[in-house]
Amino acid sequence: MKRKTIRNHRDFLTTEKDPVVSNFYFIVKAKLAAKKDARYGIVATKRFFKLAVRRNRAKRLLRDWIAYNEHLMLPNADYIFIARPSIFECSREGGRVKMANLLKKIAK
């Protein structure tokens, strides 16, 4: 199942009651959606990643980890993934495991 991405700014906004989990590499925010068609959004800001090459690489890593752990995502939630500068210190397999752990925490 291929998930849709969030493209609207207002859809990126979350409330204080929405679950937020984080680790050293990224932050995950979840927001319950009214529809069964859940989406995800990725944020890699210029504040932390000055070069576009680094922003794009951070987003590419997150997309890979999301695709691998898609089965752990709730079908009725929108997810926002925010990259941290330390994301490059994590290996591909390590990131997949870390993301799986955070997604399991949100599902509870």
Image: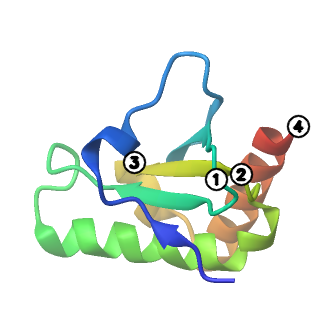
Q: Nearer the viewer, mark 3 or mark 1?
A: 1
Q: CA distance from mark 3 to mark 1?
A: 29 Å
**Three-letter residue code for mark 3:** Arg
Q: CA distance from mark 3 to mark 2?
A: 26 Å
Camera-nearest residue between 10 and 27? 10
Circles 3, 2 touching at the beta carbon (< 8 Å): no
Q: CA distance from mark 1 to mark 2?
A: 6 Å
Q: Which residue is mark 2?
A: 76
Residue 103 to residue 59: above or below: above
Q: Which residue is mark 1?
A: 35
If the image is split into quadrants, where does the N terminus sit?
bottom right
Residue at 58 percent across and 74 percent down: it is 3
Query: Mark number for residue 84?
Result: 3
Residue at 46 percent across and 30 percent down: it is 14
On the image, the x and y values in percent for residue 96 come to 68, 70
Q: Nearer the viewer, mark 1 or mark 4?
A: 1
Residue 61 to residue 2: above or below: above
**Three-letter residue code for mark 2:** Asn
